[in-house]
């Protein structure tokens, strides 16, 4: 698991430069997988989408990992 943390921690640190909340949230006990959750709050949904797009591109561009899936859930002020 130490090896996995060596990959996950730098990704989390890099994502924080986008002023988002980020943490490893899934597959904590699996050696070759990690689920990383990112949360962002903004007045405009377009800004939220832009930040999440940049976060996704950052992770996808890392040669040492394979991005398997992305799920997004946006909540408006009516929820």
Image (cartoon, rainbow, N blue to C red):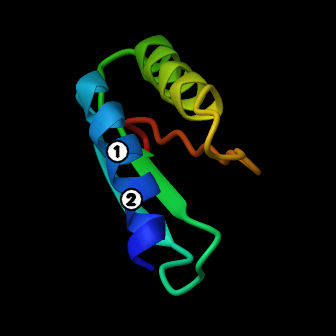
Residue 10: quarter of image: top left
In this view of the protein, which residue sits in the foreground, 3 or 13?
3
Q: Residue at the location (42% across, 13% down)?
A: 47
Q: Is residue 21 above or below residue 2?
A: above
Residue 23, image x, y percentages:
34, 58
Q: Is residue 79 above or below residue 58?
A: below
Q: Residue at the location (58% across, 45% down)?
A: 73
Q: Which residue is mark 1?
A: 10
Q: Residue at the location (50% across, 14% down)?
A: 50
Distance between the Cα atoms at labels 2 and 1?
7 Å
Q: Residue at the location (72% across, 46% down)?
A: 66
Q: Which residue is mark 2?
A: 6
Residue 18, image x, y percentages:
30, 24
Query: How would you rate the neighbour count of disc 2 (Cα within 10 Å): few for under 14, some for 14-19, many for 20 or more?
Result: few
| Left or right for 43, reference 61 | left
Q: How many marks?
A: 2
In this view of the protein, which residue sits in the foreground, 13 or 7?
7
Determine contact: label 2, label 1, CB under 8 Å: yes
In this view of the protein, which residue sits in the foreground, 22 or 41?
22
């Amino acid at each position: 698991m130490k090896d996995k943390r060596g990959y996950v921690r730098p990704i989390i640190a890099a994502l924080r430069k986008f002023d988002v909340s980020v943490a490893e949230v899934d597959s904590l006990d699996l050696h070759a997988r990690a689920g990383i959750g990112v949360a962002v709050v903004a007045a405009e949904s377009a800004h939220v989408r832009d930040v999440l797009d940049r976060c996704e591109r950052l992770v996808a561009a890392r040669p040492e990992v394979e991005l398997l899936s992305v799920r997004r859930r946006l909540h408006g002020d009516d929820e």
